[in-house]
Amino acid sequence: MFDANNYFQEICRTNKITAAAGYKFCRVTGSKHMEEVIQNFKYEKAYFCIDDTEDGYLFQSGGGYLERRQYYLFLIKKFSFNDMSKQHAALNECRLIYRQIVKKLIRDRRLLENDMTYLKLDRIPFYEIPGYAFSGCTGIHFTIIVDIPIELCYDGNEWNLQ
């Protein structure tokens, strides 16, 4: 089974930019609930966040069923208030990290398929965080879609039948 938290935490740890700039890996439940970012906001300058709590669905493909999950990733960097050159530099850093992550996903796609984890990389939407958001932060967030086979064979032992 694909463990998105471990996979992206490893990316955060091993990417040269995120490692050198001190990006803190965080788990969040959406852009409105940046729990671990808020907990670490006083002490950290940059964040690599994953939200794995979003909706998914099951669908039939070929002879079996797959579970499609969406993972939302956030790259957030603090900058000095009223300094547009620092805001621009922080946003460009997040853009660069995003592109590097996409390159790694493309490379890892075949390796993950060996474990029956299918990355949907034909479309990877991203959204830039405008202006002075998150109390002096800027960044980018994007969506990764993953399909994983799931067993849906009926098992009578799971039911209390009369």
Image: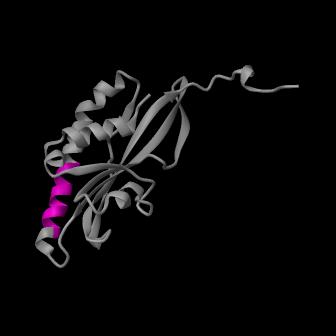
Q: Residue furthest bottom?
A: 82
Residue 21 is situated, as x and y percent measured from the top left of the image, at 15, 52
Q: Is residue 97 magenta?
A: yes
Residue 60 is situated, as x and y percent measured from the top left of the image, at 55, 32
Specify whether 13 is left or right of 113.
left
Q: Is residue 40 above or below residue 63?
A: below
Say which of 128 and 80 sits in front: 80
Q: Residue furthest right?
A: 162
Q: Is residue 8 magenta?
A: no
Q: Quadrant of residue 57?
A: top right
Q: Which residues are magenta?
A: 87-98
Say which of 98 and 8 sits in front: 8
Residue 79 is situated, as x and y percent measured from the top left of the image, at 19, 68
Specify whether 83 is left or right of 152.
left
Q: Is residue 113 above or below residue 72?
A: above
Q: Describe the colour scheme in one phrase.
A: one colour
* Number of numbered discs visible in the structure rendering: 0
Looking at the magenta stretch, what is its main secondary structure? helix
Q: Is residue 122 above or below residue 3?
A: below
Image quarter where the N terminus lies is top left
Q: Residue furthest front?
A: 43
Q: Residue at x 55, y 37 (%)?
A: 58
Specify whether 80 is left or right of 74.
left
Q: Residue at x 32, y 57 (%)?
A: 40
Q: Residue at x 33, y 51 (%)?
A: 49
Q: Quadrant of residue 103?
A: top left
Image quarter where the C terminus lies is top right
Q: Residue at x 32, y 56 (%)?
A: 141
